[in-house]
Each structure stands twice: as C-alpha cells, then as structure tokens.
Amino acid sequence: MHLVLAIDSFKGCLTSAEANAAAREGVLRALPQAEVTAVPVSDGGEGWLEAFHAAKGGAYVEATVLDPLMRPVRASYLMQGERAVVEMARASGLTLLRPEERNPLLATSYGTGQLVADAVRRGCRDILVGLGGSATSDAGCGMLRALRDAFGEALELLRAVRFTIATDVDNPLYGPEGAAEVFGPQKGATPAMIDELDRRAQAFAFESAQRMGYDCSREPGAGAAGGLGYAFMQHLHAQRRSGIELLLDAIDADTLFAHASLVITGEGKADAQTLRGKVPAGILRRARGHHLPVVLIAGQVEDREQLLAAGFAQVECIHPVGIPLKEALRPDVTCRNIQHLLGFLKSFLLFTPI
C-alpha cells in the first residue's frame, strides 16, 4: 500500500509536519511494509512557508518589520527565484499578541506591507501572499501605507509585480458576512468595535471606488485577513486563489495521488466549515479525481454525517470522548492519540473501500 499523509496543523498544538510525523508512526506500527509519503499542507495561514519550502525549496529571508501594534519583530518570507512566498501572519498575526493586547481597532497590517516591500526591493516580481491568522481588521490600509512609505513616488514599480493572494475565505469586505462581523470577535472586537470597523471598511471602499472607478469590496475573499484581501485586489490587482489548490499544484498532487492507495488528511476541528475551502476539502476534491478514498481525522469532530455525505470515506476524532480541552490541546497528548488511532489502521481499512 502507498498512503499519502496530508494533515493540516492542529492550531495552537501541532504543526502540519508534526501531525504528519505522528500519523506516519501510527501507520507504520499497523502496516510496517506500507509506503508512506507525508506532505506538509496549509491553506495560506499557519505553516504556509514551510509547506511551500517542502514543495519547491527556496531561501528564507529575514527582515525586521513592525508587528500589529507597531513594535519591531523579526519575520521571514521565502524566496524562490523571482517569486516570494509571504505568510502575512508572520508580521501581522494574532499569535504575535497576548490575549489582553488584542484590539483590531489598533492592530495594523503595516508589517505585511514591509515584507512585500522587502521582497520587491530584492527583485521579486511574483509575490504569493498567504492570508490567515491575522490580528487585524484594517482593510489593508496599514499594508498600503507601508508600501507608500517604502516606494514614495516610485510606487509605479509595483505595477510590474504580479500579486496572488491565497485564502480559504470567501467573505466580502463589509456587511453581515464581512471581515469585522465574522472574524472580529476572535481578534478581540466588542460589538461596538465591530460596528466601527465595518463603518471604516465601507468608507474606505467607497472612497477607493470613487477614485479608481471600480470596486472589489464585494468580491469573494475581500474580507480575508481583516480586509487585507480587499486591499490586494483593489489596489494591487491581485488574483485570488484557493490556498490549498495552489499548494496541491506546487507538490504535483495529481502525480502523487495517481500512485496512492489511500489519503489521510486532518485538522484541529472538522465540521461543516471544513467544506468551505479548507485543507481537507481541497484534498478531498483532488483525490476524488483519482477515485482515492480519503480519511479525515481531527481533534474535534462535528457535523460528521455532513462530512461523510461530502465524500470522506471515514471521519474520526483522535481524542476519547470526554477528554478535557486543556488535555486535548497538549502536543504530546495529541501526538499520542493520532498514533493510537492510526495504530488500528488494519481494522480501520476494513471499512474503507480501496
């Protein structure tokens, strides 16, 4: 058997590589003769750089930029010839702030603009930006200000750069499904803050449309990363792509899946939202083109019947029922439970058509 492991990070617990390593150990305990290929995966958020580095190589470049509260921080991006791969969360991510510091009225995407500017100065003319895990809801104003500060009158230099944004989010910039309303609470926004952030985003979009003659604020993905998706599409003519689809192309998943017997994917929490462009859904779509069964594992499972109806061969929670959340978030416990679950792979496969 040839098994492909393509498990996303378990947020705040395991990286994609760590989750894959645990799964690999469990698989080989059950099937010592199996051929196992593990590929780090990401949809544009956590682990984006590592996934692209594993797929295509390249050199990490470090720069001192400003975090969401305008404090200096070291952040890296990946250079692959004239292409730069940027993970916006490295400069403007929620993980850079302590819980008590979260305030999207103050948080800025300025540091992401600095990473982009650094890549352009080094000759990159194809910039791929992963949008995910942001602390911000500034509609990308901070990022645009950083680019103006970097290039001044030479801003036309950016017209020669091709921008692609990678996101699993299809929300518009503002409104009931917009960046502030949907994602603001997890960034520390109160109801009053959400109203103000939504008002600011709408005003910025109206002013931009009046001046530029077109409006990207309702485009799918405009609300990604607190509206950073909008700024890239409206002001830098970026193309939006599914993050997992971009990565699957980079690893040549069609060739990989053509020689596989089974795919195991996963994430921290699997539910109906999984089907809206997240890593496991992208893998399922691609694998079904090769008539491959896909097993989904997760630290928490909801909407199991909906996931099975979508095409997953099996959907399994790695943790025993009733485990305390604090315990379930421990990396050693999560690794052990992934190994334990997949250690029963022989009986597992009895119910998975191959």
Image (cartoon, rainbow, N blue to C red):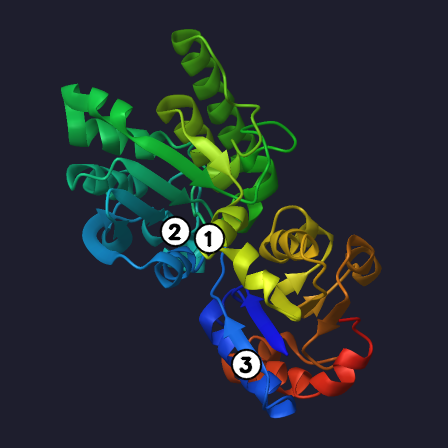
Q: Position of residue 214 (x, y in %)?
A: 47, 12
Task: Give the Cα separation between the discs numbered 3 and 1.
Answer: 23 Å
What residue is pinned by disc 2? 89
Amino acid residing under circle 1: Gly
Q: Which residue is mark 3?
A: 24
The amino acid type, in three-letter code, at marker 2 is Ala
- In this rendering, would 225 be left or right of 352? left
Disc 1 residue crowd, few under 14, some 14–19, many 20+, Cα 10 Å? many
- Residue 134 vertical placement versus 100 (above, below): above
Left or right relative to 187: residue 34: right
Residue situated in front as seen by the camera: 83 or 33: 33
Q: Nearer the viewer, residue 317 or 325?
A: 317
Q: Quadrant of residue 338?
A: bottom right
Label 2: how many Cα within 10 Å (few below 14, some 14–19, many 20+): many
Secondary element under disc 3, as helix, strand or loop, is helix
The answer to whether residue 241 is above or below residue 198 is below
Tell me residue 346's x, y (percent): 73, 86
In the displayed structure, 301 sits above or below 244; it is: below
| Local SS, label 1 | loop
Quick one: label 2 or label 3, which is nearer the N terminus? 3
Residue 45's disc is: 1
Quadrant of the snapshot with the C terminus = bottom right
**Residue at 36%, 29% in the rendered image:** 141
Q: Residue visible at 41% across and 29% down? A: 238
Q: Nearer the viewer, residue 16 or 321?
A: 16
Please name whichever residue, 337 or 315, is drawn nearer the observer in this view of the structure: 315
Name the front one of labels 3 and 1. 3
- Say whether marks 1 and 2 touch (CB < 8 Å): yes
